[in-house]
């Protein structure tokens, strides 16, 4: 075995370990701590005229490992960018149709849920807001019924 073969073998072994770690990660596993908060995205509405929200970034930082359904945050002021998807027929046929920038203040130990709802069916305009998961209270964005 040459040095080149050993390097290739080492890279392959590292890649397998990383992939195994990703395969075991399930959304909802991130937990807030006494120093951090968690923000989660997910589905809105139902098929037809339903879809999901994806985390694009928070304070300019993208979620790691391409998992865009949850992210750990430091406590304090946050500026988040979310993508809103519309799904046709099933949740495997979705198109990104809107972006929303939402500001909120995260508290350590809290989990936040991103919500979306279409303002008028077919309009592709959305209310997008963030709720404290424990209280259901909106902490940022524009909930339904509030003028944008």
Image: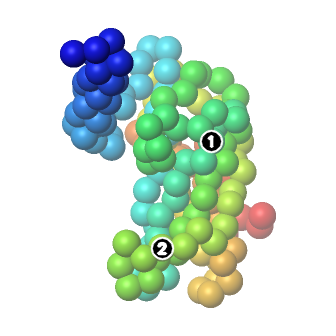
Specify the quadrant of the image occupied by residue 25.
top left
For label 2, the residue is 94
Q: Quadrant of the C terminus?
A: bottom right
User: Can residue 14 be seen in this snapshot?
Assistant: no
Q: How far, Cα to Cα, is label 2 from label 1?
A: 20 Å
Q: Mark 2: few, some, or many residues within 10 Å (few <14, many ≥20)?
A: some
Picture residue at 48% right of the left edge, 73% below the top = 94
Q: In terms of secondary structure, where does tag 1 sit? A: strand
Q: Position of residue 133 (x, y in %)?
A: 43, 43
Residue 20, quarter of picture: top left
What number of labels is visible? 2
Cβ atoms under marks 2 and 1 closer than 8 Å? no
Element at badge 2? strand
Circle 1 sits on which residue?
57
**Residue at 47% in and 51% down:** 41
**Percent from the top left, x then y, of residue 105?**
65, 32
User: Which x, y percent locates residue 48?
Assistant: 43, 85
Compared to residue 117, the image places residue 65 above or below, namely above
**Label 1, residues with CA under 10 Å away: few <14, some 14-19, many ≥20:** some
Work out whether mark 2 precedes mark 1 in sequence or the reverse, and give the earlier one: 1
State the quadrant of the N terminus.
top left
Residue 121 lies left or right of residue 88; in this view the side is: right
Give the camera-side residue of 10 and 129: 10
* Residue at far front of view: 2
């Amino acid at each position: 075995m040459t040095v080149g073969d050993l390097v290739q073998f080492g890279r392959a072994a590292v890649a397998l370990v990383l992939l195994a770690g990703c395969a075991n990660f399930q959304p909802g596993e991130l937990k807030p701590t006494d120093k951090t908060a968690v923000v989660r995205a997910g589905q809105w509405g139902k098929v037809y005229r339903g879809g999901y929200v994806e985390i694009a970034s928070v304070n300019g930082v993208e979620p790691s490992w391409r998992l865009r359904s949850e992210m750990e945050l430091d406590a304090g002021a946050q500026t988040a960018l979310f993508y809103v998807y519309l799904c046709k027929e099933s949740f495997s046929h979705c198109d990104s149709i809107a972006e929303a920038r939402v500001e909120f203040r995260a508290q350590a130990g809290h989990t936040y849920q991103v919500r979306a709802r279409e303002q008028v069916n077919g309009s592709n305009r959305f209310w997008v807001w963030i709720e404290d998961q424990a209280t259901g209270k909106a902490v940022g964005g524009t909930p339904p019924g509030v003028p944008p």
